[in-house]
Image (tube, rainbow, N blue to C red):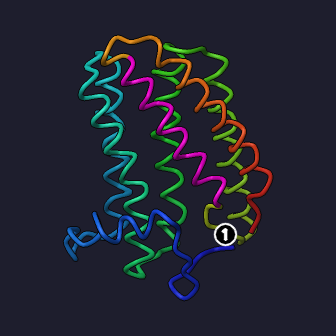
């Protein structure tokens, strides 16, 4: 089901952001601005990963990922949900996660592992595209939101491992990303308008 300004359902993280980031967000900043910012940050994240500047890679990746929760909470709390944002936000997420999978996770963990995540993300995009062509829209479900959170946590753990030079964190990143794969499949199966 597509969430609109008339049918808003708050998520647990909305309450946290209602006390933290939303109050300090200037009124002229719209949720779609944060979505666009996330897209613009992707090349900088990738450059930091490519050149192995781990503090910058971690900081930029986490900030870009935070804009995902931030823009959604801002849209729901300020009643600024738009159809463009409903379509662009997941595309921006997949651009961020997909490019990090190709450049970083494939190199640090395993190509097949990263491709599995990427293929599932592409299937989610394909499903959304088919529904859009049929005139049906749907907002992200809870499985998809949890999947994105686990993907961010898994990549962040891997980045911390690189930053600190501690390979013992890598299995935790693999476990977290594996759980994200399971939730991605569940999200794909249950993502119906």
Q: Which residue is drawn at 28% across and 16% down?
A: 51
Q: Name the residue under label 1.
A: 137
Left or right of 43, for residue 101: right
Left or right of 189, for residue 118: left
Q: Over which residues does the magenta segment extend?
A: 142-161
Q: In which quarter of the image is residue 138?
A: bottom right
Q: Where is residue 102 in the image (x, y as percent from the top left)?
A: 52, 24
Q: Main secondary structure of the magenta part?
A: helix
Q: Which residue lies furthest to the bottom in this view?
A: 6
Q: Position of residue 55 (x, y in %)?
A: 24, 26
Q: Nearer the viewer, residue 139 or 15?
A: 15
- Secondary structure state at the residue bearing disc 1: loop
Q: Residue at x 33, y 59 (%)?
A: 34
Q: Nearer the viewer, residue 105 or 154?
A: 154
Q: Quarter of the image containing the N terminus?
A: bottom right
Q: Which residue is drawn at 50% across and 18% down?
A: 170
Q: Residue furthest right?
A: 189
Q: Quadrant of residue 44?
A: top left
Residue 40 among those drawn in magenta: no
Residue 68 lies, with reference to residue 44, above or below; the image says below
């Amino acid at each position: 089901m597509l969430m609109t300004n008339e049918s808003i359902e708050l998520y647990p993280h909305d309450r946290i952001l209602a006390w933290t980031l939303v109050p300090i967000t200037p009124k002229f900043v719209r949720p779609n601005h944060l979505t666009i910012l996330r897209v613009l940050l992707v090349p900088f994240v990738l450059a930091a990963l490519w050149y192995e500047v781990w503090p910058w890679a971690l900081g930029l990746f986490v900030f870009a990922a935070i804009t995902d929760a931030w823009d959604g909470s801002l849209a729901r709390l300020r009643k600024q949900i738009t159809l463009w944002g409903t379509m662009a936000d997941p595309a921006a997420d997949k651009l961020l996660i997909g490019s990090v999978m190709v450049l970083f996770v494939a190199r640090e963990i395993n190509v097949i592992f990263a491709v599995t995540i990427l293929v599932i993300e592409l299937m989610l995009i394909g499903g959304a595209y088919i529904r859009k062509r049929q005139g049906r829209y749907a907002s992200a479900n809870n499985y998809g939101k949890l999947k994105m959170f686990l993907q961010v946590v898994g990549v962040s753990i891997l980045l911390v491992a690189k930053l600190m030079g501690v390979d013992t964190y890598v299995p935790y990143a693999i476990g977290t990303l594996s759980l994200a794969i399971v939730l991605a499949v569940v999200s794909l199966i249950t993502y119906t308008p």
